[in-house]
Amino acid sequence: MKSLELRIPPLVLLLVFGIAVGAAAAYVPPVSGLMASGKWLAVILMLSGIGVAWGGVVSFKRAQTTVNPMTPDASSALVTSGVYRVTRNPMYLGFLLMLLAWSCWLASGAGIMLSVGFAWYLTQFQIKPEERMLEKVFPDSYPQYLQQVRRWL
């Protein structure tokens, strides 16, 4: 399965899964519990997701390192401040929160399951390969960072 590693840009993956959530919501009956409170939860999740992802981008820009997820070996700085003190992958966490928000907005239980699939795919084919590369680029500091900060939350 190494052929899938670092192949699909995470933003493209988010769009593909977002379309899949919309399609699932059209064919699978909504979850009644989400119909009542889902809109409020969706707004909270969406705003949180945008904030967390944006915080990650801003931290990378301040450190003047690449935000291109396809070339983690081009990283010029290991960012460990700001939102990176809480999660090693704020941009991906933000994407997941946005996908969950979309699922809640549509009251889609299938969408929530697809969101879990999104997180699994990102972990296996984007995050783990990035981690291997970052250990090579930052052999002294990255292993310690791995011990201090969780992958997702």
Image (cartoon, rainbow, N blue to C red):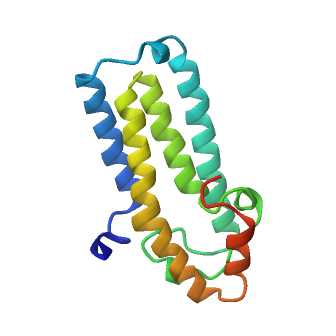
Q: Is residue 107 visible?
A: yes
The percent coordinates of residue 93 (x first, y second) are 56, 51
Query: How many numbered marks are there?
Result: 0
Percent x, y for residue 20? Answer: 28, 39
23 left or right, relative to 59: left
> Is 104 above or below relative to 13?
above
Residue farthest left in this picture = 27
Identify which residue is drawn at 75% across, 61% down: 85
Q: Pinpoint residue 86: horizontal percent, then vertical percent.
A: 73, 56
Residue 109 appears in which quarter of the rendering?
Answer: top left
79 relative to 129 in the view: left or right: right
Residue at 73%, 77% in the rendered image: 144
Q: Is residue 79 visible?
A: no
Q: Quadrant of residue 83?
A: bottom right
Nearest the eye: 26 or 153: 153
Estimate the x, y position of residue 10 in percent, counting from the top left: 41, 58
Residue displayed at 55% across by 73% down: 66
Observer-nearest residue: 54 or 115?
A: 115
Residue located at (53% from left, 27% from top): 42
Rendered-image quadrant of the N terminus: bottom left
Q: Is residue 103 above or below residue 116?
A: above
- 19 in relation to 82, above or below: above
**Residue 70 vertical placement versus 10 (above, below):** below
